[in-house]
Image: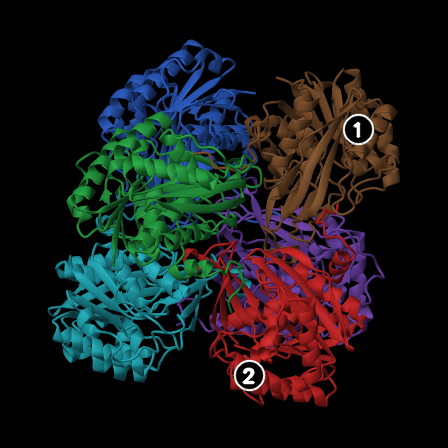
Chain colours: A red, B brown, C green, D blue, E cyan, F purple
Amino acid sequence: MKRVVCFGEIMLRLNPPGYGRFVQAESFAASFAGAESNVAVSLSNYGVDAAFVSKIPAHEIGQMAVNALRRYGVDTSLILRGGSRLGVLYLEKGAGQRASKVIYDRSDSAFALAERGEFDWDRIFSNADWFHFTGITPALGENGAALCREAVQAAKKLGVKVSCDLNYRKKLWSIEEAGRVMGGLMPYVDVCVAGWETAAALFGIAAEGSDAVINVPSKDNCVSIAKKLTERFGFESMAVTMRGNISAVENTWSGMLYTGGAAYFGPEYKIQIVDRIGGGDSFSGGLIYALLENYNPRRAIDFAVAASCLKHSIENDFNLVGLEEVESLLAGDASGKVQR
Amino acid sequence: MKRVVCFGEIMLRLNPPGYGRFVQAESFAASFAGAESNVAVSLSNYGVDAAFVSKIPAHEIGQMAVNALRRYGVDTSLILRGGSRLGVLYLEKGAGQRASKVIYDRSDSAFALAERGEFDWDRIFSNADWFHFTGITPALGENGAALCREAVQAAKKLGVKVSCDLNYRKKLWSIEEAGRVMGGLMPYVDVCVAGWETAAALFGIAAEGSDAVINVPSKDNCVSIAKKLTERFGFESMAVTMRGNISAVENTWSGMLYTGGAAYFGPEYKIQIVDRIGGGDSFSGGLIYALLENYNPRRAIDFAVAASCLKHSIENDFNLVGLEEVESLLAGDASGKVQR
Amino acid sequence: MKRVVCFGEIMLRLNPPGYGRFVQAESFAASFAGAESNVAVSLSNYGVDAAFVSKIPAHEIGQMAVNALRRYGVDTSLILRGGSRLGVLYLEKGAGQRASKVIYDRSDSAFALAERGEFDWDRIFSNADWFHFTGITPALGENGAALCREAVQAAKKLGVKVSCDLNYRKKLWSIEEAGRVMGGLMPYVDVCVAGWETAAALFGIAAEGSDAVINVPSKDNCVSIAKKLTERFGFESMAVTMRGNISAVENTWSGMLYTGGAAYFGPEYKIQIVDRIGGGDSFSGGLIYALLENYNPRRAIDFAVAASCLKHSIENDFNLVGLEEVESLLAGDASGKVQR
Amino acid sequence: MKRVVCFGEIMLRLNPPGYGRFVQAESFAASFAGAESNVAVSLSNYGVDAAFVSKIPAHEIGQMAVNALRRYGVDTSLILRGGSRLGVLYLEKGAGQRASKVIYDRSDSAFALAERGEFDWDRIFSNADWFHFTGITPALGENGAALCREAVQAAKKLGVKVSCDLNYRKKLWSIEEAGRVMGGLMPYVDVCVAGWETAAALFGIAAEGSDAVINVPSKDNCVSIAKKLTERFGFESMAVTMRGNISAVENTWSGMLYTGGAAYFGPEYKIQIVDRIGGGDSFSGGLIYALLENYNPRRAIDFAVAASCLKHSIENDFNLVGLEEVESLLAGDASGKVQR
Amino acid sequence: MKRVVCFGEIMLRLNPPGYGRFVQAESFAASFAGAESNVAVSLSNYGVDAAFVSKIPAHEIGQMAVNALRRYGVDTSLILRGGSRLGVLYLEKGAGQRASKVIYDRSDSAFALAERGEFDWDRIFSNADWFHFTGITPALGENGAALCREAVQAAKKLGVKVSCDLNYRKKLWSIEEAGRVMGGLMPYVDVCVAGWETAAALFGIAAEGSDAVINVPSKDNCVSIAKKLTERFGFESMAVTMRGNISAVENTWSGMLYTGGAAYFGPEYKIQIVDRIGGGDSFSGGLIYALLENYNPRRAIDFAVAASCLKHSIENDFNLVGLEEVESLLAGDASGKVQR
Amino acid sequence: MKRVVCFGEIMLRLNPPGYGRFVQAESFAASFAGAESNVAVSLSNYGVDAAFVSKIPAHEIGQMAVNALRRYGVDTSLILRGGSRLGVLYLEKGAGQRASKVIYDRSDSAFALAERGEFDWDRIFSNADWFHFTGITPALGENGAALCREAVQAAKKLGVKVSCDLNYRKKLWSIEEAGRVMGGLMPYVDVCVAGWETAAALFGIAAEGSDAVINVPSKDNCVSIAKKLTERFGFESMAVTMRGNISAVENTWSGMLYTGGAAYFGPEYKIQIVDRIGGGDSFSGGLIYALLENYNPRRAIDFAVAASCLKHSIENDFNLVGLEEVESLLAGDASGKVQR
């Protein structure tokens, strides 16, 4: 069994039930969220030996996060326990023309305050085949950026493949700062994943030709971005997600994989959204699985797009689908017909 | 008041709230489900004297099932109480491209183990005008098939009209077995109801011309199937439901009634699905009502299609609509405008 | 800060959770509803000093209503406490082709039994800039009509601007009675708001040209109605809401403002409905705000339409959106993209 | 099977979940309540053919009430459907030193406005063995008193045994008025049930000797009251309930049956209260069952006390216990031990 | 109407439903909590003009806190809006021998980071009769202590009476630090409230004679503590709460008021706990009300003890009882009898 | 870290919310239950490497069971996946004098149908220190008894210590059959746990002297039973649980450990029950932990009793307490005081 290590922050996610607004809420659904832990759960659901590495307080709220991951089979034995707070992500689901809202309360979390030297990378990467991180950790501050550098350098040294989802968060840092810091990490990255806009904006590539209304890129645009970045940073592969925002509950969804000098586009789905948070992470999870399994590029991008299409039908951040469900969608069964 | 006897199994239906997946569930909504009891509830809501006949354990879970039927006015006085377990149907609602899932846990239920001779058909059919059963009971095994034979023979003898919904369930038996057993029961049936695919597959009729994408049949196809089966089995009428599976939450819905050598098509609705389980049963319920009331064929199929269109907007298996609501939809009010 | 007084009844609104039917309900969501209090909440959310005037029983159910308003910042200090019952509005949400249902249980409420002389209009209107009432209060009976006359006369005398939403409710009175009584109040009204059908029907104006299927008016029709009524009653402005009923969960939505002899049409939105009750009231709330702020007619109607578009995405009657959310939609962000 | 007719009002009962206060409530549990319908449900649960007679609006809220009764097997076929509103009972459960609160909103309900002549007593009493009513119906006003007179006279004429629970409600009428009206009905009553205080107060009997703290009567006191009333009105039997109010969640509970010149006291239970509403009604239900079955006086009062003891452990008004559960408690199993 | 200003932090309180443990939670009830805001709500419920002063983020989670206070009539117009986070208090309710647990996540909250000079005390105290703060604010750090000094000095200067609940929180600071800082504030305090242990420990007074098992103090002990502190700091009055911890769901509860050189003891209640958080605050609220109304010392302490006894029967921090309910308990109605 | 293997069935546990009766339920809380898995969870919470061995269907309901165990850190890698159904346990919680009810629907579960040879005991016991099973598995039928024999023989051979909770279930087999089968297994058992009644009844030992009312044994009785069985079967230790059934929500609770010829009694607690299911299992869990840690007999029995006392305050079967909580109770903190 292949082993993947995902490294990042996990937060308590609190959202009002249904389409309720914050100011109406008398209770919050409590789940756990984080770009990298989302990927770990996806991989565990596909049968991969997925470990999540982070720093989480020793108190019960921290334990809830650990348990949420164990529930879905993620290896939590490498998590450091300590610090005083778990970050909180307040989420209000949008509907129709009303957008979803995220309020971060993640400053000074146990993970954000973790420092170089706390993680024993040699032990973490023993037996690992793959390492995944995202642009959110460096966005947390100097500590986060330093930890990522430490991690990718160790991974490279130990021959562990490295993937990164650029995941730009404008509430956390500026586009310039992000470009500078992420640019420094890219040379260590084998597989880069990004939304098309992020990829272009972060590294100063002009992107034209997208559909103005729902903001989908042209295929040429995607290829051009991936080509330029691959050349600049020497990626083995670059994948780009292509979301079209029709409304808060309806999107189009697809993705492209650029590898070996060629671009492969996955199917485009029109999706009714149950919960879009974690959609991009489920794409990364699908892609990493496919690449670990040595799928050819076409099958790999198809798998990643189908897996993440299904995520949008599932509440909370984690993509709780199995291999056979992704395969069934790829085989053409998008009809939602009841099996009985 | 006309009296209809429905005969079959009723199960505890357990589904996670909303669009939750099984693996996320910390609670299940508990309701009761069964093709034949669904028909009985439909009929009771239209003012028909509907009795449900089954075998249900004497314990409280069994009592819950009885109470669920009594709540909507179904006569439960003919139900045998005994046996040890009530079958369970676990249901996970699909969304978008993710299909709904059904897990049956119905083996060895009190009803599945009921044997010939346990039901006093003469008493059951006293004052009855109509008898309804479905292909699910014979699918439960030898006992079920024998009970159905016993029942239809008694009904014929006593001059009670017989309807049957073919209702093929591939998780219960093979298409060949189903065709053989159901074929033996058909000569006793006056009114046959079926999805177009089931009707064709069960009795070896080639069916072409359907829309490949959402799997709706051509009208010609439906007529051809009904014509052939009517001729083969001597039905008084045969009704065919026509569902187009666009996604787990969107379908097209219509139906056809073939009677007196002519085919009548009902309206086609595009439906946003709240809960599709029981949709076919609500069609049977509407059709039986219309035929009991001697509606002409056009009005009968219109009523059945409109009634079952409304079912898709209602949670759980039972079709909780009244006559005036079906009539209002037929009169053209599909706008969902608030009346106040 | 501008001060607006809204006058009318507030009721306990009871609805089954989700899309549940009344006959399935084991619990009711409890909120508070009333055309005029809905407007007060809208205005308070935009930062206006909004007072709600009514008569509400002194018991705890009445207190719940008062608290619901205080929660959103509405001034409740002018509310009379007394009488014995708070009106109840039972609401069942429709889905697909199944319409929403309203059952009123509002007869003999504390407000419906309030009499002339109970309200001290001089005190109520001290410092007030605007007075808003709707056609529902006169529909409650002689007392309601008399109170409205008393109120608008006092408002006029004290130089307070008067707005009225015609809000015809056929379950409360006949169209003829409504036309007669409302006609008597219109000369005191500066700004009149109405659905296009109500406006036409109430005052006997022929209205043609609407789209037969979803019942949207032609623009010409709207202008013609507004022009005639403005001339007849001397309104300063007349606003018309334009709803197209596609299904219980999908509508089109727009509106027109006729003022200074010219008609201004707002944007048309296609809306996925979370809760449409209070949609018209949120239009009035947006319009009053815009007029208080001296927006030009184009910006005023745009604001009113966008504000009420957003309401349809929010559970319960109150439109819980702030200025920046309305402005953001007007600025073109209807994509529902998550901000993070 | 014996047949009992219960006559009275049924209301929608709305209570905040758990121990929530009204002013905290965002939802209400919805159930149905009424002294006489509670008795009918008790009897149906014991296997008696129990019919409930009332007048209930034809709308869906009325249908909910009918369905609640049908669910537990009560015959609802004699209920008149009409009028416009169903009475509402708002209930807030107390805890510790905080008392439960009831807010009635029952004026002008369909039942309260029902008039003499609307009920066909000859039909209602055909095949009936027993008629039960309570002091709440006459408390609703002139109509209610007249209907009760009409009913008891018909019952007497037709040889139907009559029971009455005095059930004084001080929010509905004065003690003097109640004494006068109920006094006029007592001569038709065979079996009278009352709380000891009510019995004494209503008919001007001095009652001394009760425990001052928790307000339980002395046994002598109970006997004295029952003896005097039996002599005055010629009851066949009189039963008295004896509640000791320790706190909102803890009571003592017992009862006495006075018949044939002798007094029989049931067991005294110390009860942890889940829901005390309907406790007295469950006593009447148990007593009527025992008398219908010709239990001897000792067994009859034991059964009534044990049945109503169990009621206090059950949410909502209805006493959902079966014969075997009452018998098991009487047989001494009050330990709450799990059976498995 | 008297006006009271309460100053302190308000936090989001998150607790699993019922007796659920943190590690079982899939949702949290969301309410708002803080010693000083709890006092403000108590006072508002008694009809006092109560204002709450704090610093709260401008985002929606902050708005929820403001709305929670407005809902119960607290004046929130003096609250500063700013900063980035609202403190969070995670609460797990204990049962039986399992203690309740509190996890604070309040560091770096908007209030904890507020600085001297941000609050305009002259404006805040205009028209104020009373100022209330607690030992929690100085425990938040240097800023908090400085703000309290600033506030009490301003209050003294403006002739506003000052009360303080010592409220020692060992998770926030050491007993030595607390004694030193609080000692510096006491000279400005007119009315001091404290649990008996806190009062003794904070200022180094030996306290003997308490019941070892449930930890209730002897009356002599309480008097002795109050006498010493009154003499040391020159309080006008000192009140001491006396809680006996029998189990997580059962406590004894009483209190003493020491004023004018004499000690007055309130009634002792045995309480079944629904929610004990906020119990002490409700005592302060009752006491301040009684002193504002110039109750004599006996009536004042009785009122405070009865008011806070009732709090323990109410979910969440706020004491949602009215004057008449406290009076009713004082009048001896602790039986929890239903009023109907 | 010590490793314990627990072997048995795990079932889906379905119970109505709160104190609701089955016939009132519209939903069920879904959790997982089984004597042996409960022990595994207890041990995992104390930091032991606990593995659960069973056979569980491969479908999603089976996966829910696996996930429930993983969530709390239990090693599920040895579980066989197969068979068609997971057993169901319906539970209705009692209150006051109303007993809790259990309805088993566990026949023909995947585990009950598992056969000799399916489990690879050598692999299962590699690295194991302890093996735990209960009398429920042999009660499931011949297969279960054979599997237990196979397991204990393998354990003995491999030097793994064996514990057994006799756990007699009268709904599954007769006392005679149980005595015979369990008697055959006892020689392999090192540590035997049982309720005092079970221990006596199963092996034909007269047990006198218990308190007749709440059914607690005399200490002498317990010692006598343990002494006799220890002598008969050669146990290293025998532990006896001592429950006094006061009511469905109140019990007394203690236990005794007989080892080395001496008896040690733990503390006796009076417990307010939140959920008593799993109470005995949590005693076994505590005892096994204490013995693994080589606690002396006094400390061992104290730990087991305190651990299981706390279980009664926790919803569902699993005992979710940590070491420090048990230690804190043993240290005398039973006051339920909030720590803050």
Number of residue marks:
2
Chain identity of mark 1: B
Query: Disc number at residue B148?
Result: 1
Residue B92 visible (yes or no):
yes
Badge number at residue A144: 2
Residue sitting at x 44%, y 30%: D301
Q: CA distance from mark 1 to mark 2?
A: 70 Å
**x and y percent of residue C134 in the render?**
32, 39
Q: Quadrant of the C terminus of chain F?
A: bottom left
x, y (%) of residue C310?
Answer: 45, 53
Within 10 Å of disc 2 (Cα), the crowding (few <14, some 14-19, many 20+) is many
Camera-side residue of E271 and B113: B113
Q: Residue at x 68, y 82 (%)?
A: A189
Nearer the observer, B77 or D267: B77
> Could you say which disc has been placed on residue F89 in the image?
none
Where residue A284 sits: x, y (%)? 68, 71
